[in-house]
């Protein structure tokens, strides 16, 4: 795990050293997990989390950029059940954290002939490694209440093999991957982005066949603000 994070850090430093522009990003995630074979989700299970990190852009042309970098991003979902007209409940939150590396093709549409003011759309793949997170359970039944919290566990998988080493029903896959797509507007001093992350990997480490169906995969929408930090 330490070797993987070190490699990611080296790549990030190299990217930033050669980038033509870079910016800090932060915002809100609206995380969910697909619960049908076709990849559908239940909106009532959407969990609010966050994303934050540093992204860079390479100018390919006046209208095309390549965007990449590092993001700390929260995924997961929640579940809530209420009884006795809402007086009693069971509430569960599942919020794993990942370091994510997106690689997006960005197409810009300039506004008022100003290159730094534009509307843009983008899409591309992402890869992510699980680094932490918590699951929480709150219950109330009559006068009795309870609350418990536990650290989310990831398996110690070797990404260079096809299997899932150290797989267990109580462990997530260490590595996630999928596709990003979104749009935004870039103004003189900041940008606003809306993104949708479409996970392609089943999240539990015992689920080795990602192509069996689209159940138990991350679905994460986000709204973020980017602030330029340099050239």
Image (cartoon, rainbow, N blue to C red):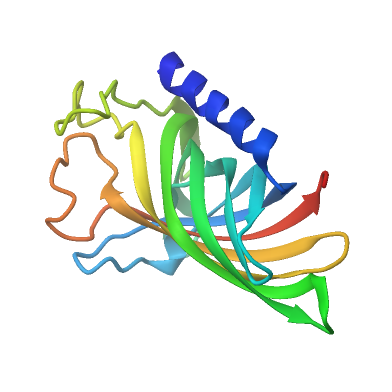
- In the drawing, does residue 152 fall left or right of residue 51? left
- In the drawing, does residue 71 fall left or right of residue 41? right
Which residue is outermost to the top?
A: 2
Residue 181 visible in image:
no
- Front-most of residues 161 and 112: 112
Residue 192 visible in image:
yes
Q: Quadrant of residue 38?
A: bottom left
Placement of 93 over or under 87, stated as above or below: above
Placement of 198 over or under 177, stated as above or below: below
Whole-percent x, y for residue 143 in the image:
51, 40
Q: Residue at x 82, y 47 (%)?
A: 231
Whole-percent x, y for residue 150 in the image:
44, 26
- Front-most of residues 56 and 4: 56
Whole-percent x, y for residue 119 in the image:
70, 76
Q: Residue at x 31, y 34 (%)?
A: 172
What is the tally of numbered marks visible in this picture? 0
Which residue is outermost to the right?
A: 189
- In the drawing, does residue 26 fall left or right of residue 83? right
Whole-percent x, y for residue 217 in the image:
31, 53
């Amino acid at each position: 795990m330490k070797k993987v994070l070190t490699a990611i850090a080296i790549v990030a430093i190299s990217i930033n050293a050669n980038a033509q522009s870079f910016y800090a990003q932060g915002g809100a995630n609206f995380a969910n997990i697909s619960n049908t074979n076709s990849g559908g989700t239940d909106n009532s299970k959407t969990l609010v989390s966050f994303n934050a990190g540093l992204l860079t852009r390479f100018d390919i042309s006046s209208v095309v950029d390549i965007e990449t970098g590092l993001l700390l991003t929260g995924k997961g979902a929640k579940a809530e059940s209420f009884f006795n007209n809402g007086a009693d409940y069971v509430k569960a939150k599942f919020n794993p954290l990942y370091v994510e590396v997106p690689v997006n093709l960005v197409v810009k549409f300039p506004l008022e002939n100003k290159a730094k003011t534009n509307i843009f759309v983008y899409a591309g793949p992402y890869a992510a490694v699980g680094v932490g997170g918590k699951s929480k359970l709150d219950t109330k039944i009559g006068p009795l209440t309870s609350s418990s919290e536990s650290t989310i566990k990831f398996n110690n998988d070797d990404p260079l093999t096809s299997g899932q080493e150290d797989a267990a029903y109580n462990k997530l896959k260490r590595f996630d991957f999928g596709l990003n797509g979104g749009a935004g507007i870039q103004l003189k001093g900041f940008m606003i982005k809306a993104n949708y992350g479409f996970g392609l990997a089943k999240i539990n480490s015992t689920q080795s066949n990602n192509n069996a169906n689209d159940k138990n995969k991350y679905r994460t929408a986000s709204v973020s603000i980017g602030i330029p930090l340099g050239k």
